[in-house]
Image (tube, rainbow, N blue to C red):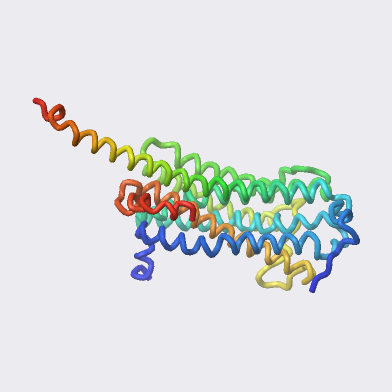
Amino acid sequence: MPKFNFASFADFLAMGNYALYVWLSFGLTFVVLFGLWFISNRQQQQFHQQLRVRIAREARVRQHQSQQPSQVQEP
Amino acid sequence: MFKWLDPYAKPQRLYAVCGAWQRVLMPMAWLTLLIGVVWGLGFTPADYQQGDSYRIIHIHVPAAIWSMGAYSSMAIAAFIALVWQIKVAQWAIGAIAPIGACFTLIALFTGSFWGKPMWGTWWEWDARLTSELILLFLYVGVIALQNAFADRETGDKAASLLAMVGVVNLPIIHFSVEWWNTLHQGASITKFAKPSIDPSMLWPLLICMLAFALLLAALTCLRLRTAILQHEQHRSWVRDLAEEPTDAKV
């Protein structure tokens, strides 16, 4: 079992004086990865949303047309 | 083989398969990444020369390797799309390209944050760094080309061609550290030789590599599902999905 390499949590955060480089690397990596995941998920949800809106709209149009048949068929 | 593969070329079937895979792969990928990163950050000894700055390796190397892995899978999809005219292969290109671009971006900036304390510079126009930057431009080019035409099919074809031509860059990236004098070090892990890295440091690195591979697969499934839906939106099976909104979140 590997054991914790640092004497204290403050040591862990300091990263042997490389804190800026190490935490910036890991932080930005997670921002990019989570961002990609979030955007990909949202694209799919947006598609489903737009599809539902479109289907509802088409149903409304159909209903409207069936209510006024005389106007549509006027020569 | 084609008999076995054929059903997967059917969009509706592939949509279901990707959904099943994604449900398994996505949590596995994030969990593996968490384990690898925590292990790599806190539970490995510091490097005798580089101190704690070497811990960047746990994301730098996996991102760099899978930025090339993503490109090869994208190029294979492009080949299949051009030769056998399989449309889902064409959609896969657009699904993979942004993931590969993100991986390349991660490899570049983590390399930069590692290079500053170790080499004394953020950026050097050296063979490895430049060829990896070209990989990023190739990804961006593929994405841009796919969306650049009013006719979607023309864009898909052009993007496939660029993806295939860009494959020449992969061996250049891989061998750049051997062919040219560069600041970048050679490989620490190769298939044939004993790794030049201590086992206590090797395991978390391998776990992180697995995590990035799983993430690539899971995100590809997720994005390919969206692409299938968008291209098939006028088919009845997609419209039927709207009736069961629970599926939207999966």
Quarter residue B247 falls in: bottom left
In x, y percent, where is residue B91?
42, 51
The residue located at (74%, 49%) in the rendering is A25
Is residue B173 found left or right of B55 in the rendered image?
A: left
Is residue B200 found left or right of B74 in the rendered image?
A: right
Q: Is residue B34 visible?
A: yes
In x, y percent, where is residue B217?
54, 60
Against A67, residue B199 (above or below) is below
**Which one is in front, B240 or B107?**
B240
Against B78, residue B195 (above or below) is below
Against B13, residue B191 (above or below) is below
**Which one is in front, B128 or B235?**
B235
- Quadrant assignment for the N terminus of chain B: bottom left
Quarter residue A2 falls in: bottom right
Residue farthest to the right, as pictured? A7
The residue located at (73%, 73%) in the rendering is B194
Is residue B194 found left or right of A49 in the rendered image?
A: right
The residue located at (64%, 49%) in the rendering is B132
**Which one is in front, B216 or B112?**
B216
Residue farthest to the front, as pictured? A67
Residue farthest to the left, as pictured? A75
Q: Is residue B78 visible?
A: no
In x, y percent, where is residue B219?
54, 55
**Which one is in front, B84 or B218?**
B218
